Amino acid sequence: MGNTFKSWNDVNESNRSSQVYIAPNGHKFKIVIRMQDNTKFIVKTVNEMELLDGNSNMTNDGATALKNYLNSQQAFLNTYGKLDSNFFKARFIVYTVVKDTARTEKIQFTVVPRSEVEGLDANAQFVSTKALEAIQNKSEILAGIITDNQQSAQNEQLPGDVGAATDGGTADASGTNITEESMGNKFRYTMRTNGIDYECEFGENGAIEMEPLKGTGPIGSIAWEDPKVIWYTDADNTGTINNSPLMMDGEIENSYDKKFFTKMFTDKEFKNKVIAEWEAKYGDSELTGENLKGMLYYRNGNPIFATASTASNVEGAGSVDVVADADLKTF
């Protein structure tokens, strides 16, 4: 679990969208967050993130936006699980807000079993310690959770800046000299992250451009930011919150995808083998100037653009000046 916490903090040092919160108004913010243990995490926010109202209470829209963000973070999911209806059937989340500066605040969260609060509203998901303090005859465990949450909110230090985040896009992706030398080459791959089959092509800057074979699913580019494999897409630049896989820029977390693309960017022999497999299987079906010549025949079955080795055997070779469309067939 310690490695999960470390991975979270490492990601948090950059400005990738894997740690970008999308506010209810669609604006994006770099967020600072720390997972403290298996039940506690703390977040630093700015007023513009629209997570809280003027009285430091979490709003419904803010809670939804925060859940969308947390559910897009694999390290968070590995530790706490997905924040969905099943999660909240058995648990709720206690929070305490402490002003950090005039513009920022820290919010301490603790996951608590619902059984600790008798008569808690079945729809309650995020409950402030202020609200819990008003409960009469609190259990000793709940009283301890309230005190611990408040103290942690006061004492926990969260270095790092929060504020507006810059949108990334497919044009920001780049690769390595190993992939850059293969510009224009292609291969096919099924992304385990979302189960979609992609036609993949090496771009000018070494990034791998990804387009769904059947036209459904997010288009993007995969970049190498040693030692991370990063997904870039323009799908998240519209201001619309979409928590589906690969609909936002971010680090590739799926272990199979990460291993495959790491080898594509760093292992020349492996990359060339993948390209060769594609060319052997699909290369002849690519509509290029050269293989188009190989698809054109006379009605009698002889090739129009004969190679040097076959030209002398093609009936009428060298005697055709103009060929009408009706005289051709393609395979």
Image (spheres, helix red, strand yellow):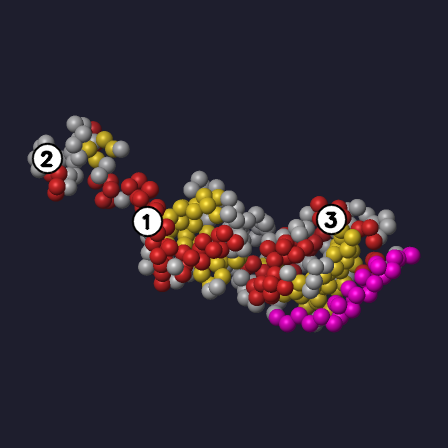
Res 25 visible: no
Residue found at x 21% / y 35%:
296
Query: Which quadrant of the figure contains the N terminus?
Result: bottom right
Give the amino acid at mark 2. Answer: Asn
- The quadrant in which residue 327 appears is top left
Q: Which residue is mark 1?
A: 276
Which label lies toward us, 2 or 3?
2
Q: Which residue is mark 3?
A: 88
Give the amino acid at mark 3. Answer: Phe
Q: Nearer the viewer, residue 38 or 187?
A: 38
**Magenta segment, which residues?**
136-160
Residue found at x 84% / y 58%:
142
Q: Which mark is residue 252?
A: none
Which element type, helix, strand or loop, lies under badge 2? loop
Which label lies toward us, 2 or 1?
1
Mark closest to the chain's N terminus, 1 or 3: 3
